[in-house]
Image (cartoon, rainbow, N blue to C red):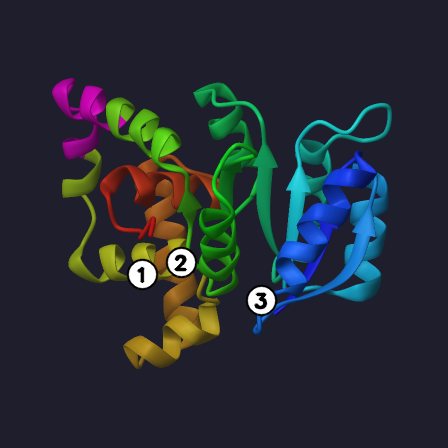
Amino acid sequence: MRVLIADDHAVVRTGLGMLIDAQPDMKVVGYAADGKEAFDKALDIRPDVVLMDLSMPPGENGLSATGRLKEAAPDIQVLVLTMHDDEEYLFRVLQAGAAGYILKSAPDLDLIAAIRTVHKGMAYLYPSATKSLIEEFLQMVKNGEEQAKYEILTDREKEVLILIAKGFSNKEIAEQLTVSVKTVESHKAHIMEKLHLRTRPELVRYAIKKGWLDFE
């Protein structure tokens, strides 16, 4: 898998590059020092995964670059690497379209596992981040909000929602469910309307709170 590293510290970029290049199934294909450079190089190089630092002063930050990149090239997976163990950053990262979130203090093996996970189209959240989402989900269940939303979906809509959240395209979902792409698009529109969601990242966040995505 081809990885682009975006971090404003040269020593961090070098260290991450050595770690990733040491893996038999990974190769670093580029480096960037800020969000703008990460965005431009990602569109040019087309890596499988962008390892994106959130804070990269004085240039464009990683959050902004992630949002722009996911709009321009949704097939490129973004794994956010940050020092902030804060649920506010977690939710903003998911809303921007990132597939994963891991702390800079995480062990090397966890980082490598995270890259492999998002490369497969699955979501990866560091355990402390997962805890924040679970706590919010439990509070919503307590208030009756989550249960009410979930019960209004048909069984087929639930299947489609899970596959969308796992990163499958409309065509891939249609093939798996043996239906037309138009049918999948119709189901997606109904899901969005029923759950009052507008974007794919919001669907992913919803699926995470339901416990449908793997974090390993």
Residue nearest the observer in this picture, 7 or 19:
19
Q: Nearer the viewer, residue 180 or 48?
A: 48
On the rendered image, what quadrant is the N terminus found in? bottom right
Q: Which residue is mark 1?
A: 160
Secondary structure of residue under mark 1: helix
Image side of residue 56 versus residue 119, left or right: right
The kind of residue tagged 3 is Gln
Q: Quadrant of residue 2?
A: bottom right
Q: Which mark is residue 23?
A: 3
Q: Is residue 48 left or right of residue 68?
A: left
**Residue 15 visible in the shown view:** yes
Residue 25 lies, with reference to residue 141, above or below; the image says below
Residue plotted at (43% across, 75% down): 172
Whether label 1 touches label 2, CB < 8 Å: yes
Name the residue: 61% across, 62% down.
75
User: How far apart are the alpha carbons under marks 1 and 2?
Assistant: 6 Å
| Magenta residue span | 137-148
Give the residue pinned by disc 2.
Answer: 164
Residue found at x 53% / y 56%: 115
Element at label 2: helix
Q: Main secondary structure of the magenta part?
A: helix
- First along the sequence among labels 1 and 3: 3
